[in-house]
Amino acid sequence: MQITARSQPTPSRPLSQRLGFRLVAAVAIGAVLLGVFTMYAHPDFLVSMADQLWSCF
């Protein structure tokens, strides 16, 4: 006879908390993408970053 422990089901987070997390994640991802696209508007910055990265090797 095996004795096994019953696992209690973990309560899920409320819907408002899940939606809030998704909203914060979407805003953060949007901010990162906006920053990347803004850097493409400044090609001299991209060239200097590429030069610095290349100098590491």
Image (cartoon, rainbow, N blue to C red):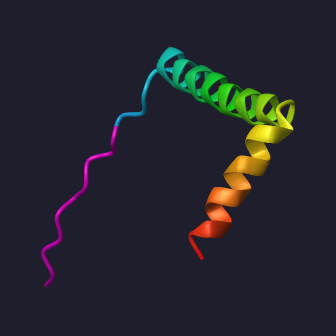
| Secondary structure mostly taken by the magenta-highlighted segment of the chain | loop
Q: Which residue is located at x 52 percent, y 15 percent?
A: 16
Q: Which image quarter holds the C terminus?
A: bottom right
Q: Residue 4 placed where, x, y %?
A: 18, 71
Image check: 12 left or right of 52?
left
Q: Which residue is located at x 77 percent, y 45 percent?
A: 46
Image check: 18 left or right of 49?
left
Nearest the eye: 15 or 21: 21
Nearest the eye: 28 or 57: 57
Is residue 3 a member of the stretch shown in magenta? yes
Magenta residues, start to end: 1-10
Is residue 29 a member of the stretch shown in magenta? no
Give the image quarter of residue 20. Answer: top right
Q: Residue 25 placed where, x, y %?
A: 59, 29
Nearest the eye: 17 or 48: 48
Q: Which residue is located at x 25 percent, y 55 percent?
A: 7
Q: Which residue is located at x 63 percent, y 62 percent?
A: 53
